[in-house]
Image (cartoon, rainbow, N blue to C red):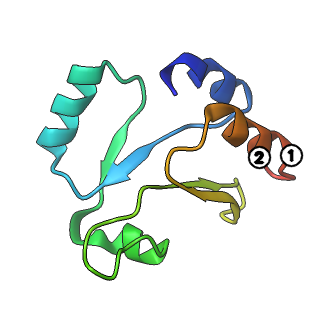
Amino acid sequence: MRATLDEFHALDTQPLGINPGSAESHRQFIDQLDLTFDLLVDEGLAVAEAYGVLKPEGGIRRTVVIVGKNGKIISRAEGAPPPAELLSAISAADDA
């Protein structure tokens, strides 16, 4: 993701990460991996629940959700899809 961040920005897109970890754990992770995008805290798992990524047995399924400027989901993929796939979905969207 880091290598293609400029390509996301060129499409007027801001990648973000989100999980239930603490703000401090996020800061450490950002520093450790030298990330150049923000990580948000999903305290209480409200976002994970809203996007339907909670596992029945507990935990979260890693999922990439691309939300358009109009708030509608453009793309959704479990796992870690390649950046090229995400960029393609954004380019093809009407409101991206």
Q: Measuring 42% from the left and 30% from the top, which residue is drawn there?
A: 37
Residue at screen point 31% across, 55% down: 19
User: In the visual, does 36 lie left or right of 15?
Assistant: left
Report which quarter residue 24 is drawn in. top left
Give the tally of numbered discs.
2
Residue 70 x/y as whole percent: 72, 61
Q: Residues within 10 Å of mark 2 (few under 14, many from 20)?
A: some
Q: Badge 1: how crowded within 10 Å, few (<14), some, or many (20+)?
A: few
Q: Quadrant location of residue 55?
A: bottom left
Left or right: 27, with 8 as reference point: left
* Residue matched to label 1: 92
Q: Is residue 94 left or right of residue 88?
A: right
Numbered tag placed on residue 1 in the rendering: none
Q: Which mark is residue 89?
A: 2
- From the viewer's side, name the closer residue of 90 and 9: 90
Residue 96 position (above or below residue 72): above
Q: Which amino acid does the dot numbered 1 rest on?
A: Ala
> Residue at (53%, 38%) from the top-left corner?
15
Q: What element carries label 1?
A: helix
Position of residue 75 measured from the top left corner of the image (x, y, whole percent): 69, 57
Q: Nearer the viewer, residue 86 or 10?
A: 86
> In the image, what residue occupies the spot 39% across and 76% down?
49
Tag 2: amino acid:
Ala
Local secondary structure at mark 2 = helix
Q: Residue furthest left?
A: 24
Spot occupied by residue 95 in the image (x, y as percentages of width and height) = 81, 52
Q: Where is residue 1 in the image (x, y as percent from the top left)?
A: 52, 28
Please determine whether, in this image, residue 79 is positioned above or below residue 86.
Answer: below
Q: What is the C-alpha distance between the residues marked 2 and 1?
A: 5 Å
Instruction: Say if mark 2 contacts mark 1, CB within 8 Å.
Output: yes
